[in-house]
Image (cartoon, rainbow, N blue to C red):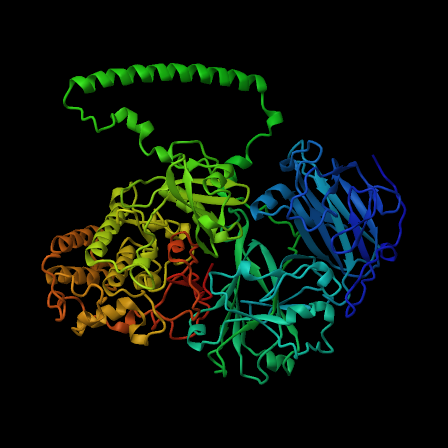
Amino acid sequence: MEIKITYIFFFSLVIFVVPATSDVPEDLIFLNCGSDDDSVDSDGRMWLGDNGTNTHIFTGNSFPVKAEFQDPSLPSDVPYMTAMVFSTESTYRFPVKSNTRHYIRLHFYPMEYENLPPDEGLFGVSIEGGVTLLHNFSTYITAKALSQAYIVKEFSIPPSNTEIRAITFTPSPETNDSYAFVNGIEIMSMPGYVNDGSYAKMVGIKDQSINVGSAAIETMYRLNVGGKYVSPVKDSGLFRTWQVDSLYIYGSGFGVEYSAPTTLPINYPANLPEFIAPVSIYKTARSMGHIAKINMNYNLTWLFQVDAGFTYVVRFHLCELLYTKPNQRVFDIYINNQTAVTAADVISWTGMIGVPTYKDYSIYIPDSNGGGGNGEERLSVGLHPSAISKPEFQDAILNGLEVFKINDAEWNLAGFNPIPSPMMAKSEHRLPLRQLDFAGIIMSAFISVVLFFAFFIALLQLWKALKRDCDDDSRFSSSKTPAWLSLYTENSQTSVVSNNISGNMPNLARHFTITEIKHATQNLDKSLMIGIGGFGKVYKGIIDGKTQVAIKRLNPLSEQGATEFETEIEMVSKIRHQYLVSLIGYCKEGSEMILVYDYMANGTLREHLYETKNPPMSWQQRLEICVGSARGLHYLHTGARHTIIHRDVKTTNILVDDNWVGKVSDFGLSTMNPTNYQNVSTMVKGSSGYLDPEYFKSKKLTEKSDVYSFGVVLCEVLCGRPALDLSLPKQQANLGDWVMLCERTGTIHEIIDPHIGGQINPACFDKFVDTAMKCLTHHGNDRPSMSDVLWNLEFALQKTSPSSPKKITEPLSAVADIPKETSSSSSHSPCHSSSATTTPYFDHYHHHSTISSASATTLSSPAVATEGEGESFDVDGNRISVSLCQNF
């Protein structure tokens, strides 16, 4: 039907509190679509209904609907619990002031409205003048991909010479059943926020700028850096939402959050209107920290997913809260590895402490796949202390950050729908139940039952026949399972079931429901929690009434965690080995991502070596655990169908069962195809102190990188100290380098763990140290294979003679032929000063930051924008990020 309704001036009817420091926008419209009545949201804003006479002009076929379920994450029931649905092209026309830039915010709550499947909500949105805001937009897919219940799209529309803002919703013509809908619409004027003639300098293109004042703009991200969430009513009059920035920080190097002293006022300069950003944005900040050596070795980096083929404006909000003089805190700013600003000095820009400013820079993001991809690319923002200006303090600061998309040449802002995680792929494409043929279902079920009983009878007859053969023929041992039966009974705890992860994923991992997980953990009882960290929580549980398991519940907000969740299932479900920690199953329901592992009663190897209340582990136990983990790595490298490289071998990823058998765990960073490594990840990954220096420098991953990391593990076992200890003198901080130096100088006997010094047979000691030194050789081709490492360790184990121990007090001669490397070539740079730790057992289940460690010689100079991958560190439970502002 067609509805014709008269104009009114909304801003005369909408009443709420606006911050006193801000001007009330001349145009201010809040429309609660599909509602008959005016309603007040949880922030106290009045939203007017659009199904009566006191509203806009509307044309098209539509009908109002109500949501049947209110998701707990909705900020308010207004405007999300009602919607207007459009079956044909439909247009809202709002009276506004001409020649004024406007915000337009569209609110969507994708769910089933009156039997309309949410996945059929596919539509476009455009405004007068031919500007396309959205095209073939699926709120359902977008919400699923972002793990959100609702979506808000914010646009900034350039001035028009008419007094009408027309917003048109068009169901997609690509499907017959598509429809459009919207829950709420906001329109407000933006005086002075972006004026015609406002320019943003292009990054990477000399002497080029773009005019953003005449552009149509979509807000992609708006962050209160170092501060808390800012709701629309706490904004400076424009009702913007400012999110926390921690979710977008690359790696785990979060730097330091701090606030302005209560005695420090924020004074806006005359040329900066207060509605640019609220005072709360400038009163908080994030810096890199106070340790210069660490700051010079990494970038504080944020990473964003954006649409390819568009130009983006990045707005930096800056206000110095600590220093008062120029050249005290000076830093460089990078956008996508390209220098945006050299020697940024906030005090030099503003003149004094507590005075805010902002800077705009633009960059074009091409499609790296030449148009053949899904349209998703990455945009990175990095800060690094300036080396050129030699400031008093090596640090950087940022208070707020906004990322805007600029329309393309065809006045289009629409990008692709985001690609949901492969975990959802199969379930996302299920047909709605109403589309299924129930007669076909019944017939299929009947046939299935008949076939099942026929198969069962045949199976029973075969079992009886084999049983008779076993009783009559001595060739069959009663302790063995017949080969045919092993396919169904072997690994019963990981029974073959159909899973919902992806069509390409093997059906070897058991699928648990969230109800089963809660039952196994007594509703996720805190008393059963055995680990906690930024990646999630780990619980001890019981399944099938008797089997102990470790249940890792991933944080749904962790993007990297979702990737590793997929990798773990794909990788571990394909392999089973006595010396690998088995993945029993997984749970993927909604935003829940849960992995279920064998429970390892004695935790990690590390918690038995140092910084622990556990009794000292004997040398015999240590060596046996090393042999077991070497067998696990040997199987990964040679026993599977394809070579599997673990990429994160360390003492916290070697778990110990109740029989003191060491097993390799945590395959979230593993890869099966090193020759196509760039297709697996664009980032060098590993943990500081363990990372192969050749891998870091060349970006070429081989199984010899695992060998290097395992060599560091052997050093930890021998010395009983962490792989990286920044509290020690520089020469001793990196354990691998320190052990090699002590071996060359004949003093290695002085650094042995005193708990085991009198337990080691000299022949065993010689072979063990010789093996460790060869693993730590800097050139991968010179390192032994895991097969050779395993043989040497088993040889050393045979030489263990507890009955006649001899204290090792003399230098070794058996390793005199080891190449003499300079210690500086592999000493890993310190990267973190935090003393925060995680529960050691949890480190197996902990989210791995994408991490790499570089040699001191490599990182002795400031990080610069270079070709390569982003880097980060993991210091034995303390997660830190080192992004060298390289390609993402």
Q: Is residue 660 above or below residue 18?
A: above
**Quadrant of res 28:** bottom right
Please indicate whether residue 772 sits to the left or right of residue 304 in the image: left
Screen quadrant of the N terminus: top right
Q: Position of residue 467 (x, y in %)?
A: 23, 18
Q: Is residue 334 above or below residue 681?
A: below
Q: Is residue 849 above or below residue 315?
A: above
**Residue at image coords 58%, 85%:** 325
Please indicate whether residue 229 sits to the left or right of residue 620 in the image: right
For the image, the number of numbered tags is 0
**Residue at image coords 57%, 16%:** 439
**Residue at image coords 53%, 54%:** 377
**Between residues 309 and 314, which one lies in front from this camera angle?**
314
Instruction: Examine the rendering and report whether any part of residue 411 can be seen.
Output: no
Q: Position of residue 763 (x, y in %)?
A: 10, 60
Q: Position of residue 598 (x, y in %)?
A: 36, 43
**Between residues 844 and 226, which one lies in front from this camera angle?**
844
**Between residues 269 and 622, which one lies in front from this camera angle?**
622
Instruction: Examine the rendering and report whether any part of residue 47 can be seen.
Output: yes
Q: Residue furthest left?
A: 804
Q: Position of residue 345 (x, y in %)?
A: 57, 79
